[in-house]
Image (cartoon, grey):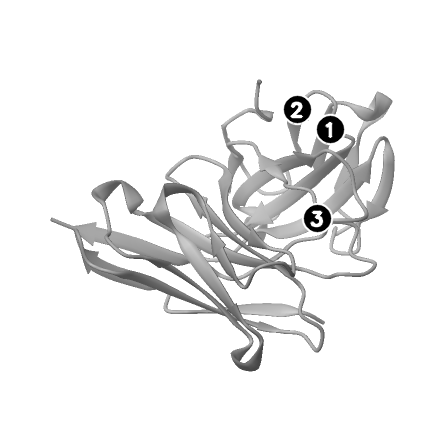
């Protein structure tokens, strides 16, 4: 079974530039998550999709971050414009469904963003 | 709000020694609890989870964790460390209600294993 795919793996940009990350979840997984992992910290949930609808974006800085999941499969996360403090690893994860007993989240390898 | 505290950002052990990584949670109601491992340049992998069944949970790679409600703890242990265990370990909590499968992570503990 193929895992969660993410691209690019690394990205270096200057502040005020725009950047986009792509995620392809495990086939059949209805729920998709984007996490931000700053160096020395644990991952923080940015946004969670159930199919193509948003169920939690309470910690997404909506003035500069946006995400979409068209057709309930792939997802893109965009930052526009980027700030120095956005330097982090962006992790995508997917799970079978939400609700009821906790369903295991499977993580991709992440995209390491450096903002100069 | 629920949170997780991992005591010790770095732990160093000798190969063959006991591994003990500490995790305490804050919640009035025992939540679901998890341990994840992250190897360099890789995503997180689930080691084990507690979902209100047995308090002693066994996971992959010889790791286990014990849920202690009285201490609000969920420490991770392994009797004998291997060099391959060197990685970063994250404890996480998921609320039982209204959480939509949400995970709240601790800051992580980096485990070093010396020959």
Label 2, label 1: how far apart the Cα atoms are: 6 Å
Q: Secondary structure at mark 2?
A: loop
Labels 3 and 2 within one chain: yes
Q: Are the residues at dot 2 and dot 1 in contact (C-beta closer than 8 Å)?
A: yes
Q: Which mark is residue A29?
A: 1
Residue corresponding to mark 2: A26
- Residue at the limit of the structure toward the front, as seen here: B54
Label 3, label 2: how far apart the Cα atoms are: 17 Å
Q: Chain of mark 3?
A: A
Residue corresponding to mark 3: A102
Crowd around label 2: few <14 · some 14–19 · many ≥20 (10 Å) = many
Q: Earlier in the sequence, mark 3 or mark 2?
A: 2
Q: Are the residues at dot 3 and dot 1 in contact (C-beta closer than 8 Å)?
A: no
Q: Is residue B17 visible?
A: yes
* Residue at horizontal 58 percent and vertical 39 percent from the top: A91
Q: Secondary structure at mark 1?
A: loop
* Residue at horizontal 79 percent and vertical 56 percent from the top: A58
Query: Can you say whether B109 is above or below B30 in the image?
Result: above
Labels 2 and 1 within one chain: yes
| Residue B3 image point, x, y percent | 62, 69
Crowd around label 1: few <14 · some 14–19 · many ≥20 (10 Å) = some
- Residue at the limit of the structure toward the right, as seen here: A53
Q: Chain of mark 1?
A: A
Left or right of A37? Residue B79 is left
Left or right of B61? Residue A111 is right
Q: Secondary structure at mark 3?
A: loop
């Amino acid at each position: 079974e193929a895992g969660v795919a993410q691209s690019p793996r690394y990205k270096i940009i200057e502040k005020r530039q725009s950047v986009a990350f792509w995620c392809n979840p495990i086939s059949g997984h209805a729920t998709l998550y984007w996490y931000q992992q700053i160096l020395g910290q644990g991952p923080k949930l940015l946004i969670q999709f159930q199919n193509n609808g948003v169920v939690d974006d309470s910690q997404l800085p909506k003035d500069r971050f946006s995400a979409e999941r068209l057709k309930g499969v792939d997802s893109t996360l965009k930052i526009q414009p980027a700030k120095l403090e956005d330097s982090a690893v962006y992790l995508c994860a997917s799970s079978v469904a939400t609700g009821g007993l906790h369903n295991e989240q499977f993580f991709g390898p992440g995209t390491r963003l450096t903002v100069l | 709000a629920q949170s997780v505290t991992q005591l010790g950002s770095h732990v160093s052990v000798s190969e063959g020694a006991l591994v003990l990584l500490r995790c305490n949670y804050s919640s009035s109601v025992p939540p679901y609890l998890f341990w994840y491992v992250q190897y360099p340049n890789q995503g997180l992998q689930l080691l084990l989870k507690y979902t209100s069944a047995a308090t002693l949970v066994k996971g992959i790679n010889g790791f286990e964790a014990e849920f202690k409600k009285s201490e609000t703890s969920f420490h991770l242990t392994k009797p004998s460390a291997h060099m391959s265990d060197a990685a970063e370990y994250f404890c996480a909590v998921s609320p039982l209600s209204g959480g939509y499968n949400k995970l709240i992570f601790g800051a992580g503990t980096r485990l070093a294993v010396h020959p």
